[in-house]
């Protein structure tokens, strides 16, 4: 099945909105989604799998007397099934309870301009092309170190399209592409097994480097061998990209969501204009980032995405809003309504959460550390306390830094603390920013982190 | 449906020369609610219908998924799957082979006392709002309550080229309740889950009053708690924590795909990996439990699988592919979240078997340690490093339960820690949860109270 045309997806969305209004909805909104994905998978050292997944559907929100009903379908053939979906949304709304804070869907605004989010070359990738990508990655891994075993990984190419329509006249379409390759590795030597090491490259345009991914995943695993325990004490910790993404996702990225703040779930409540991080920290939520993995013309309810200053030189400047949370405070949405395809109602999420990088090279950052750790990934970040920002995680893989150099791999060290203290103790940023999920950030150095060794 | 799937399988075998083909069709209806405090954010309903096609050609897998039952669309999808398999076989070193299965024909019906589809959505809203009300009214310090409710009801149709055809009803009822409390600068957080494959009657036991109070009481009690000391300590773990430890720290390593990937259990089959008081099962046959089903997504009957017997690894969890590698039979652990994804090895209801200690006997000899009663998330690594976050814990001082501690977590190496389990209680609880391994699976974890001589406790004090 080929991709639906822009007119097809938009007219489905508009038809559903009209149908809902005709059947008694006060307001209605439709988000339609299409995803076409081709992948090849590496399992236990070889490419042995390939898949083609076609997923499309639409979700309808209807409002009746300030109650919200939602229904979705993944069957889009024929008007009858759309009308049935509309009826279910209306039924759900009528069964529900009014929300006095409901103040309507967003109104029409011109959509943002975005750059480098779609590449025809990605749509044209065949499974054979992806097998080639995955092989390059595997070969680079095998060449780097014989003690390394590529556990799993693969390569994938996706075409994603979205259409929005609501009863305030909002109507739009956007499409994008993503290509990625990834590899998870372990190394084994004389009875020792390393933790999983992981590397990947994901881009909106067809310019990924599978050979780098393979070699880097192998390098990490090999250097994770001969691990030793460390003493329990507070020290400097460099958080590499993944570790930072994992920690921030379950703490800071929740704390800046306006609904968390409004519902007394955020330690950043009431702190706009206050110092919440060291003054070298500036963070934007940039929904328009050139080639950003979360860059779109409009968010999950048709509000143009934008660049929002969240923290400016350590001062908290803004929370992130969807339309509902914004109207509750008499503000405008910051374009942060996120949808999991057609399956859900919107919720607030960061787009491209961009920590502005510093000037130091990664080598310079490490070179200035007398004693510390560099942490590539943490285990258990999802068990952090999202309200307080407290975390207690295992640093794995991680390496000890001594006298400005990587000394050895570290076994089973835990890190405990509070993300808001860590932001205040953040004393240096490297210049090596990259995109990891919602985060775009460099390595960061945090002082005085409690490390529990043995 | 039988004819439609039969024709597709025929096509893959005849036209494309597939060695093995399976077709899984799904008709599913979901009802969902999101409640925030005493407000309904949205009442939601949806349908997810579609077909997953998996073929083995030249020893490589091809997979295609489409949201349609239309014959022409399915023909195109199966030819796609075959093309995918051929592409994937280009660089194959070791062709995949499967353990053979018996041909089965069955129609599995669920007979709930209370069928979720016959309960009006108004009642489901009332139940969830009552949970929220009970949580919020428990104490003035409770600031928020977020509830997600989900029920799924439908039919899975399974057919493969070995002659198996199964129609299996699917029924799940699930709810997650999150509460936060705040006093001064202290924020606490508490989570409860309810889950069943029996029916809506799960709320007759886990009543809105019980669940609401339990989630709120924990958040409020934690306000007075202090962070634990960091370091190695003796601990007593409650059934809820034992469950997640057995699941995360041990269970994943015993999923045969991960064992083959180099987990620390590789080459440990038949060897002692734990103290002799440790016996662990993964059981798909417990009636009504959240991880139970009659047939897995490769058409293999679920069973009760003994993984560790008196400290010795005696079994792993298999699908047809890993079973062949170990020259054994599938244990019925192949599960797919839905028609969009392939079945992979997943746990079902995983637990440690009870023995003979009372709770008092477990704690009486501990001079200083911790009692960890309820978990907040856990994760393990192939090298056996595990981490389990704790949402409810207490000090143990001179053999007695002392002050509460908050935001603790435990960590260690699975095999070292299993050897340090020196006493196992006689009680038993099973808790519902969800497990992520790229896909989400509904599971239960559990066991009795146990004592562990030493684990690393991550604390900031």
Image (cartoon, grey):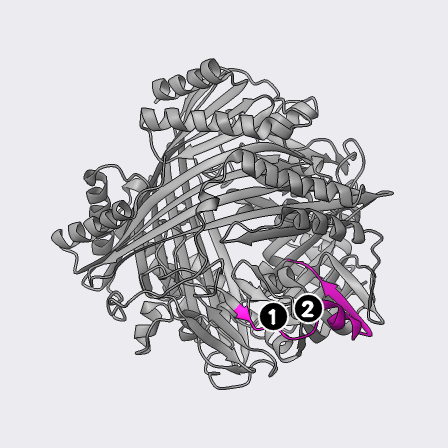
Of all chains, the one bearing label 2 is: A
Q: Residues within 10 Å of mark 2 (few under 14, many from 20)?
A: many
The spot of residue B307 in percent (x, y) is 68, 34
Q: Which residue is mark 1?
A: A390
The Cα–Cα distance between marks 1 and 2, rounded to whole angstroms, is 8 Å
Q: Nearer the viewer, residue B287 or A52?
A: A52
The spot of residue A303 in percent (x, y) is 32, 65
Left or right? Give the position of A44 relative to B20: right
Earlier sequence position, callout 1 versus callout 2: 1
Q: Which residue is mark 2?
A: A416
Of all chains, the one bearing label 1 is: A
Q: Image height check: is A81 above or below A281?
A: above
**Residue occupying image coordinates x 70% and y 52%:** B386
**Residue occupying image coordinates x 45% and y 83%:** A270
Quarter-of-image position of residue B329: top right
Q: How many marks?
A: 2
Q: Is residue A359 visible?
A: yes
Magenta span contains residue A376: yes
Q: Residue furthest right?
A: A190
Left or right? Give the position of B426 relative to B75: right
Where disc 2 sits, the SS reads strand
Q: Nearer the viewer, residue B151 or B66?
A: B66
The spot of residue A125 in percent (x, y) is 49, 40
**Contact? badges 1 and 2 (CB < 8 Å):** yes
Q: Is residue B428 visible?
A: no
Where disc 1 sits, the SS reads strand
Q: Residue furthest front?
A: A121
- The residue segment tinted magenta is A354-379
Q: Residues within 10 Å of mark 1 (few under 14, many from 20)?
A: many
- State whether discs 1 and 2 lie on one chain: yes
């Amino acid at each position: 099945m080929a991709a639906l045309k822009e007119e097809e997806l938009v007219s489905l969305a508009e038809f559903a909105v009209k149908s809902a209004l005709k059947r008694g909805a006060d307001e209605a909104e439709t988000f339609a989604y299409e995803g076409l994905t081709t992948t090849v998978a590496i399992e236990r050292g070889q490419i042995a799998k390939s898949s083609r997944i076609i997923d499309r559907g639409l979700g309808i929100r209807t409002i009746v007397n300030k109650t919200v009903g939602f229904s979705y379908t993944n069957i889009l053939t024929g008007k009858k099934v759309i009308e049935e979906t509309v009826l279910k949304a209306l039924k759900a709304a009528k069964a529900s309870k009014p929300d006095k804070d409901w103040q309507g869907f967003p109104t029409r605004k011109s959509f943002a301009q975005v750059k480098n989010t779609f590449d025809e070359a990605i749509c044209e990738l065949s499974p054979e092309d992806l097998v080639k990508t995955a092989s390059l990655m595997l070969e680079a891994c095998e060449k780097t170190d014989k003690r390394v075993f590529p556990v799993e990984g693969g390569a994938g190419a996706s075409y994603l399209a979205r259409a929005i329509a609501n009863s305030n006249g909002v109507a739009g379409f956007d499409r994008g592409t993503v290509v990625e390759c990834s590899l998870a590795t372990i190394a084994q030597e004389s009875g020792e097994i390393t933790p999983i090491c992981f590397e990947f490259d994901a881009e909106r345009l067809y310019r990924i480097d599978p050979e780098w991914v393979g070699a880097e995943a192998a390098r990490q695993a090999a250097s994770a061998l001969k691990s030793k325990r460390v003493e329990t004490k507070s020290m400097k910790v460099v958080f590499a990209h993944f570790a930072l993404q994992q920690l921030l996702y379950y703490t800071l990225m929740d704390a800046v969501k306006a609904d968390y703040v409004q519902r007394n779930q955020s330690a950043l409540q009431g702190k706009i204009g206050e110092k919440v991080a060291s003054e070298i920290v500036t963070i934007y939520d940039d929904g328009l980032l050139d080639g950003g993995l979360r860059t779109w013309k409009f968010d999950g309810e048709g509000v143009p995405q934008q660049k929002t200053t969240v923290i400016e030189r350590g001062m908290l400047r803004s929370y992130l809003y969807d339309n509902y949370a914004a109207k509750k405070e008499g503000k405008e949405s910051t374009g942060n309504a996120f949808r999991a395809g057609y399956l859900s109602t919107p919720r607030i999420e960061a787009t491209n959460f961009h920590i502005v990088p510093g000037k130091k090279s990664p080598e310079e950052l490490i070179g200035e550390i007398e004693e510390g750790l560099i942490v590539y990934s943490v285990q258990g970040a999802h068990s952090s306390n999202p309200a307080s920002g407290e975390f207690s995680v295992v640093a794995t893989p991680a390496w000890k830094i001594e006298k400005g150099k990587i000394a050895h791999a570290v076994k089973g060290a835990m890190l405990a603390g509070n993300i808001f203290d860590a932001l205040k103790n953040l004393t240096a940023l490297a210049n090596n920013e990259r995109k990891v999920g919602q985060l775009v950030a460099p390595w960061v150095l945090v002082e005085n982190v409690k490390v529990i060794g043995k | 449906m039988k004819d439609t799937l039969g024709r597709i399988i025929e096509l893959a075998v005849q036209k494309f020369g597939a060695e093995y083909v399976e077709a899984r069709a799904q008709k599913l209806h979901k009802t969902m609610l999101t409640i925030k405090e005493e407000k309904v954010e949205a009442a939601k309903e949806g349908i997810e219908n579609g077909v997953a096609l998996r073929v083995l050609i030249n020893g490589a897998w091809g997979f295609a998924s489409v949201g349609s039952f239309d014959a022409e669309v399915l023909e195109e999808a199966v030819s796609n799957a075959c093309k995918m398999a051929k592409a994937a076989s280009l660089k194959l070193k070791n062709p995949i082979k499967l353990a053979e299965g018996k041909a089965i024909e069955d129609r599995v019906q669920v007979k709930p006392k209370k069928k979720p589809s016959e309960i009006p959505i108004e009642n489901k809203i009332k139940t969830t709002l009552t949970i929220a009300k009970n949580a919020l009214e428990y104490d003035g310090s409770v600031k928020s309550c977020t509830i997600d409710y989900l029920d799924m009801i439908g039919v899975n149709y399974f057919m493969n080229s070995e002659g198996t055809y199964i129609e299996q009803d699917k029924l799940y009822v699930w709810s997650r309740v999150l509460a936060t409390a705040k006093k001064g600068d202290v924020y606490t957080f508490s989570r409860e889950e309810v889950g069943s494959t029996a029916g809506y009657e799960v709320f007759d036991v886990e009543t809105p009053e019980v669940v609401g109070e339990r989630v709120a009481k924990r958040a409020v009690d934690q306000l007075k708690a202090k962070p634990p000391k960091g370091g190695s300590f003796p601990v007593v773990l409650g059934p809820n924590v034992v469950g997640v430890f057995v699941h995360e720290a041990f269970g994943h390593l015993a999923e045969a795909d991960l064992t083959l990937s180099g987990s620390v259990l590789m080459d440990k089959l038949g060897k002692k990996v734990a103290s002799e008081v440790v016996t662990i099962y993964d059981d798909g046959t417990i009636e009504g439990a959240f991880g139970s089903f009659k047939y897995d997504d490769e058409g293999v009957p679920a069973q009760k699988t003994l993984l560790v017997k008196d400290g010795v690894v005696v079994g792993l969890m298999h699908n047809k592919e890993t079973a062949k590698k170990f020259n054994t039979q599938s244990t019925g652990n192949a599960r797919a979240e839905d028609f969009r994804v392939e079945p992979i090895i997943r746990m079902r209801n995983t637990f440690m078997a009870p023995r003979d200690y009372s709770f008092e006997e477990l704690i009486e000899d501990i001079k200083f340690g911790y009692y960890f009663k309820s978990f907040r998330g856990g994760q393990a690594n192939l090298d056996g490093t595990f981490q389990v976050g704790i949402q409810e814990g207490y000090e143990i001082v001179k053999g007695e339960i002392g002050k509460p501690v908050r935001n603790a977590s435990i960590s260690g190496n699975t095999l070292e820690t299993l050897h340090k389990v020196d006493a196992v209680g006689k009680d038993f609880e099973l808790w519902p949860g969800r497990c992520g391994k790229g896909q989400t699976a509904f599971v239960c974890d559990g066991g009795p109270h146990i004592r562990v001589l030493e684990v690393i406790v991550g604390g900031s004090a």
